[in-house]
């Protein structure tokens, strides 16, 4: 069959019917990759993991707390150099304290593989990461990302937010997986919305003359995003470690960054390149 005929089947009946047709025709091709969609929605392994993670906790299905990511981090990231007082890079990783529900920001002097693991610990997949007697989950629950460390600890007035999740989705989620995914997206974005609301409020007070620049900093906000691409990727794509997919994401990010730089570079240290109130409030 020709690609146009396959595309017609996909558009009319969806990927599930297309998979059946491809197998019947003897095509050794992943239907989603064939048409540029890298989600794993119909992957048996993903469906099994999705169901499994809802029935069992990571303490049950991974009692030994095995996680190859820790080894990869230790082999590829020079945490000693990042912790060095002479390190020119200021890096802040946020995590959520499981016991208190408060945000924890790890500065350069606290950076380690454990801190990195804590900042990306999804509680349905991984054990909470213990650091100095406290346990942590992904920082996105309380700060995604945390903007205030950049305001108080850095000299630059510019803050560039790189969106990896779409703020808006045109379609109403109807499946259980899509609803769960959208809830996560909204909850992970809520902390950013709160910080942007505070930034907008302080900026308005400065503009009105009610607050002097000596007492508060004007923050210039910018955003890099690829909504047209990211909104087409469902929750299943987040577990896709296929090399082609990772290269696709990398190239998408580079293209979005180059487009943003070309359009907004001259606005750095001058003005915000987005309307904070219209975009986040």
Image: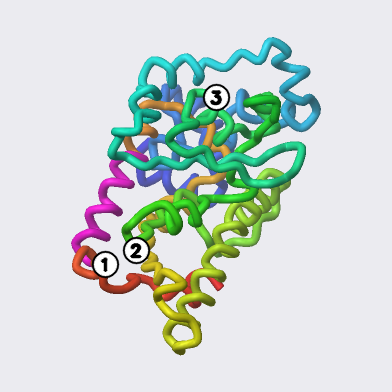
Q: Position of residue 133 (x, y in %)?
A: 70, 25
Q: Residue at the location (26% across, 50% down)?
A: 255
Q: Position of residue 149 (x, y in %)?
A: 48, 51
Q: Which mark is residue 157?
A: 2
Image: 37 above or below 274: above
Image: 183 above or below 105: below
The residue pinned by badge 1 equals: 269
**Image: magenta residue range:** 249-263
Q: Position of residue 68 (x, y in %)?
A: 52, 15
Cα separation between marks 3 and 2? 30 Å
Is residue 258 visible from the viewing direction of this image?
yes
Q: Residue furthest front?
A: 214
Front position in the image: 229 or 58: 58
Q: Which mark is residue 149?
A: none
Is residue 169 visible from the viewing direction of this image?
no
Q: Secondary structure at mark 3?
A: helix
Could you tell me if the residues under marks 1 and 2 are in contact, i.e. CB atoms within 8 Å?
A: yes
**Which of pointers 1 and 2 lies earlier in the amino acid sequence?**
2
Tally the marks.
3
The residue pinned by badge 3 equals: 114
């Amino acid at each position: 069959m020709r690609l146009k005929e396959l595309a017609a089947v996909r558009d009319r009946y969806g990927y599930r019917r297309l998979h059946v047709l491809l197998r019947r025709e003897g095509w050794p091709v992943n239907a989603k990759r064939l048409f540029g969609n890298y989600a794993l929605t119909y992957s048996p392994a993903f469906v099994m993991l999705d169901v499994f993670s809802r029935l069992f906790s990571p303490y049950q299905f991974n009692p030994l707390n095995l996680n190859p990511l820790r080894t990869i981090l230790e082999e590829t990231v020079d945490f000693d150099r990042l912790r060095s007082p002479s390190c020119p890079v200021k890096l802040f990783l946020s995590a959520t304290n499981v016991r208190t529900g408060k945000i924890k920001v790890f500065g350069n002097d606290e950076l380690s593989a454990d801190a990195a693991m804590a900042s990306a610990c999804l509680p349905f997949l991984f054990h909470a990461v213990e650091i100095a007697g406290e346990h942590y989950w992904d920082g996105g629950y309380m700060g995604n990302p945390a903007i205030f460390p950049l305001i108080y600890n850095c000299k630059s007035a510019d803050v560039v937010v790189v969106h990896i999740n779409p703020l808006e989705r045109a379609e109403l989620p109807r499946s259980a997986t899509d609803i769960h995914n959208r809830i996560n997206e909204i909850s992970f974005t809520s902390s950013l919305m709160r910080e942007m609301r505070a930034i907008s409020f302080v900026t308005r007070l400065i503009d009105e003359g009610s607050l002097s620049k000596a007492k508060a900093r004007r923050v210039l906000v910018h955003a890099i995003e690829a909504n047209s691409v990211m909104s087409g990727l469902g929750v299943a794509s987040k577990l896709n470690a296929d090399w082609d997919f990772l290269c696709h994401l990398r190239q998408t990010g580079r293209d979005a960054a180059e487009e943003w730089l070309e359009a907004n570079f001259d606005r750095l240290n001058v003005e915000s390149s987005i309307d904070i109130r219209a975009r986040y409030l």
